[in-house]
Image (cartoon, grey):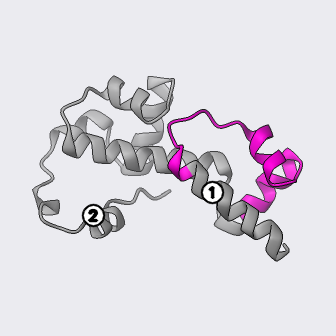
């Protein structure tokens, strides 16, 4: 992969991070990367270790975890706030990445995180594929 492609992929990844609640338009992203959809998906995976969709869903779950820790929003409200349109898919992915259901995560104490800098909280709570 050449440097120009990598720069475009990083810009798109950063935009996906900022606009995580927006729908993922693979065709538009691929066009902005000056690639076909298939080439974009393969290149993204080669550069960042996961597909654009998997990367975006992990970011959405991270945001959901933060909302569950810091608000009393319902699971449905959090699901919609992070850009997911299917509560079932959101709950399944959340459980897969976090190891517990959204309701269980929201209801337990997160006192061990109180007072930690946000960069540390993000690091220790980062969902991982098992």
**Image coordinates for residue 17, horizontal then vertical, percent:** 53, 52
**Image coordinates for residue 37, horizontal then vertical, percent:** 84, 45
Question: Residue 19's image quarter?
Answer: top right
- The rendered magenta stretch, by its main secondary structure, is classed as helix
Report whether 7 appears left or right of 82.
right
Q: CA distance from mark 2 to mark 1?
A: 21 Å
Q: Look at the numbered disc 2 and give the secondary structure of its residue.
A: helix
Report whether 127 appears left or right of 103.
right
Residue nearer the viewer, 11 or 112: 11
Q: Quadrant of the N terminus?
A: bottom right
Count the marks.
Answer: 2
Question: Residue 114's image quarter?
Answer: bottom left
The reply to whether the magenta stretch includes residue 41 is yes
The numbered dot on residue 118 is 2
75 shown above or below 43: above
Residue nearer the viewer, 127 or 35: 35
| Residue at the spot of label 1 | 13
Q: Look at the numbered disc 1 and give the secondary structure of its residue.
A: helix
**Image coordinates for residue 7, horizontal then vertical, percent:** 73, 68
- Taking the spot 66% from the left edge, 60% from the top edge, the residue there is 11
**Image coordinates for residue 99, horizontal then vertical, percent:** 36, 49
* Label whose residue precedes the other's in the sequence (2 or 1): 1
Span of residues in magenta: 17-46
- Taking the spot 79% from the left edge, 61% from the top edge, the residue there is 43
């Amino acid at each position: 992969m050449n440097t120009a492609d990598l720069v475009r992929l990083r810009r798109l990844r950063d935009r996906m991070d900022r606009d995580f609640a927006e729908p993922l338009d693979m065709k538009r992203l691929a066009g902005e990367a000056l690639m076909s959809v298939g080439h974009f998906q393969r290149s993204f995976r080669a550069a960042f270790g996961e597909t654009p969709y998997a990367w975006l869903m992990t970011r959405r779950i991270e945001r959901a975890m933060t909302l569950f820790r810091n608000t009393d929003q319902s699971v449905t409200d959090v699901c919609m706030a992070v850009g997911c349109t299917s509560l079932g898919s959101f709950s399944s992915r959340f459980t897969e990445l976090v190891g517990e259901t959204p309701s269980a995560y929201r209801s337990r104490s997160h006192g061990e995180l109180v007072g930690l800098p946000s960069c540390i909280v993000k690091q220790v709570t980062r969902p991982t594929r098992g």
